[in-house]
Image (cartoon, rainbow, N blue to C red):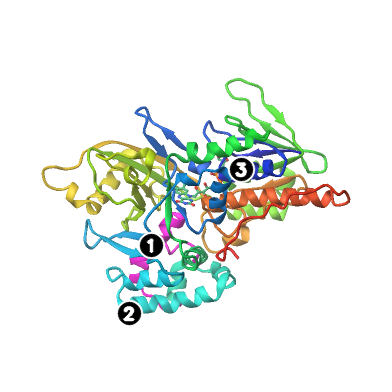
Amino acid sequence: MRVAIAGAGLAGLSCAKYLTDAGYTPIVLESRDVLGGLVAAWKDKDGDWYETGLHVFFGAYPNVLQLFKELGIEDRLEWKEHTMIFNQPEKPGTYSRFDFPNLPAPLNGIVAILRNNDMLSWSEKIELAKGLVPAMLRGQKYVDSTDSLTFSEWLKQQGVGDDVEQGIFIAAAKSLNFIDPDEISALVLLTALNKFLQQKNGSQVAFLDGSPTERLCQPMVDHITKRGGEVKLNAPLKEIQLNQDGSVKGFLIRGLNGAADELITADLYVSAMPVDVIKLMLPKPWQQNEFFQKLEGLEGVPVINIHLWFDRKLTDIDNLLFSRSQLLSVYADMSNTCKEYANPDRSMLEFVFAPAKDWIDKSEEEILKATLVELETLFPQHFGGENQALLLKYKVVKTPRSVYKATPGCQEYRPSQVTPVSNFYLAGSYTMQPFLGSMEGAVLSGKLTAQAITAQASLEAKSSSKPTSTLQPATNAATA
Ligand SMILES: Cc1cc2nc3c(=O)[nH]c(=O)nc-3n(C[C@H](O)[C@H](O)[C@H](O)COP(=O)(O)OP(=O)(O)OC[C@H]3O[C@@H](n4cnc5c(N)ncnc54)[C@H](O)[C@@H]3O)c2cc1C
């Protein structure tokens, strides 16, 4: 059975991968000339990589980890020391760490919090525990119910003071959804905390050993094509054409460079495009349907990724860092964290710049200038005095609409992978799955779509004795 999938981000590729495993023939149609969507990366003229976003993998990503295993590329994940490192704005150039000891969860997380005396006073630790422990104990149902509140509102309800919000949770909210705690749904932070604290290595991070495009997406493409599937770049979906009954007749692909448009037909169709794109592409007859109307409640959030190459080493830290500064969010010295970007003599700092709504339309020079001001506080030893670090080059990548903006009430608008149209499915990290707008969410969504397709086929074939796939998403305690 042939399945046409629009979009070669992680969701589209994951869907195609699991469909080939189940004996289907997917054809993935990607608008751009690069794989990966939000994990796409490019090489500059010097051969240096730059990326859409700084990406880290977590121990609490069961479906991504299983995918790496299935592709035989587990050794490409470079696991870092289990610690969370925050800059201390009040003491420029210094760090505060939450070190997770080798104890079972959630004890290791509790010890990590209790041992940190720079960022939380004892009274703040007690305040926070009083708010968080019941949230952890009451499980996902309680967490789901917090989607009506911003995280700031939830903290206030729990009696947690502004200092804790300022100290830790601005950094956490910005790293998870590129917005501040007074905008982000409480559900996002509580879901992440739940997954991170309930699994021993849940919050441990790994970096990929090279660019996601080559080191993760390409092996997915190889897996798909080896089994008879196809992945086409430069194949933008222009229009979803319908049959009389409202089902999909074909995907019309825009011809590039003067070529004619081409109608791709298949047995089934999947949109693995961003929510902002599918919203614009809905055929007229579907627009009145409540299922599709709900998509209007979702919108991608702007974010900027900035790369800075210096003439020297600025740090030897080999891990993710939380800048806790106004405009910058998480960052890493990729010359330490990633084998293919490694350089023993020079730093390449990669920063997520967020919230970006007031900056997305500004020039690259303005964005660089603002970044360098914050860098002076992060690395005062390299930006004062006579022998200052020299910026060799920089690269800014703007994404005006990235993952869906997870403000209160959004859960209600997230669609299932199965749609009311019999031969049309959705995939993408915005679709309903418990890992929100993440790589794990994208991979899981694609897998759920493949699972829904195979389940439907087995229903239709249930009269025959034909064996069917038993594709299941990987779960762990945190996803249950
Ligand atoms: C700056 C940044 C940092 C991030 N950091 C992390 C992190 O550390 N950890 C983590 O887990 N997640 C992180 N994420 C989130 C993660 O990247 C996304 O959740 C995930 O990659 C989304 O995958 P997707 O397949 O759902 O969507 P997308 O990646 O958006 O894929 C959609 C695809 O559809 C294609 N498309 C669009 N229009 C058309 C068309 N007309 N025809 C055909 N194709 C089309 C696009 O080009 C794209 O390839 C980060 C995201 C960003 C932006």
For label 2, count other residues whose C-alpha is less than 10 Å away and answer few (under 14), some (14-19) or many (20+). few
Write the residue at 58% across / 36% down: 221
Q: How far is disc 3 from disc 1 in space, using C-alphas? A: 32 Å
| Sequence-wise first label, 3 or 1 | 3
Give the left or right position of residue 320, taking residue 233 as reference: left
Give the numbered dot on residue 170. Answer: 1
Q: Circle 2 sits on which residue?
A: 123
Of the pair 75 and 11, the residue shown nearer to us = 75
State yes or no: Cβ of the residue under disc 3 lies below 8 Å from any atom of ligand 1: yes
How far is the residue under mark 1 from the one under mark 2? 20 Å
Q: Nearer the viewer, mark 3 or mark 1?
A: 3
> In front of the other: label 1 or label 2?
2
Residue stretch rendered in magenta on the structure: 157-186
Q: Which residue is mark 3?
A: 12
Residue 287 coordinates in the image, percent (x, y): 70, 48
Q: Main secondary structure of the magenta part?
A: helix
Residue 116 included in the magenta stretch of the image: no
Q: Can you name the residue that lies furthest to the top here?
A: 258
- CB under 8 Å between discs 3 and 2: no
* Residue 179 shown in magenta: yes
